Image (cartoon, rainbow, N blue to C red):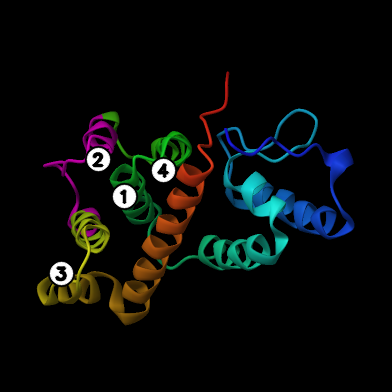
Amino acid sequence: MRLPIISPDRLSAEQKVLAADMKEGIAKSFQGFASIRDDGALLGPWNSWLREPKFGKPVWELTKAMAFNPSLPPAVREVAILVTGAHFRSAYELYAHVIVAERKGLSDEKLATIVAGQRPVDLTKQEAVAYDFASALVSGGVLPELTYRAAVEQFGEHGTAELSYLIGLYCMVSVTLNTFDVPIPES
C-alpha cells in the first residue's frame, strides 16, 4: 500500500465533507465488502480519492452517477466491472465485485472464469453482450460495430452509453487501485 489510510481525525475540512458524502454513498450502494475501517477510515479507492479531493471529488461524483439508479441489470453491470478488473488484475476491485456479483446471483463458476480472464460458456444473452463489450473496450481500439449493435439491441442507446461509461469508470478505478497498490483488506 503506497498511501497510508487517513484516520478520520487527520482529515482537513475539505476531506471531512468528502468523506461524509462517500460514507453515505457507500452505505447506499457499496455493501458486502470492507470499505470502511472500524475507526471510520475509508479503504479501497475511497482512501486514494480522499487524499486528493481536487481529483477525488469529481471521480466520486461520477461514481455516484453510475451507481445510483442504473438502468442496466445488476448482473450485466457486474460482468462488465469484473471483465475490466480482471484485465487490469486489480486485486481490490476483483475482491469487492466478486462479493457484489455473488449477491446479484452470478455463480461461482462464472465468476472464477471471468476473474481468470476467460469468457464463461453459460452467460445469458445480456451477460454475454456485456462481457464482449467490456472485453473489446479494455483490449483497446474502436468497439466493433457488431458488438455495438448487439448492445443497442439488448440495452438501447441509453443503456449502451451507460455500459461504456461504466467500463470507463472502472478502468479509472482499477488504475487508481493499481497505482497505489491497494490491497485486499485483511479479514
Please identify the quadrant where the N terminus is shown: top right
Q: Amino acid at mark 2?
A: Ile
Q: Is residue 109 left or right of residue 28?
A: left
In front of the other: 46 or 124? 46
Lower position in the chain sequence, tag 3 or tag 4: 4
- Residue 147's label in the rendered image is 3
To which residue does mark 2 refer? 114
Farthest-out residue, front: 2
In front of the other: 51 or 18? 51
Which numbered mark, 2 or 4, is in the foreground of this view? 2
- Residue 104's label in the rendered image is 4
- In the rendered image, which quarter is residue 105 located in? top left
To which residue does mark 1 refer? 79
Q: Which residues are magenta?
A: 109-127
Q: Are marks 1 and 2 in contact (CB under 8 Å)?
A: yes
- Residue 63's label in the rendered image is none
Q: Could you tell me how far apart the alpha carbons at marks 1 and 4 are, in whole angstroms?
A: 11 Å
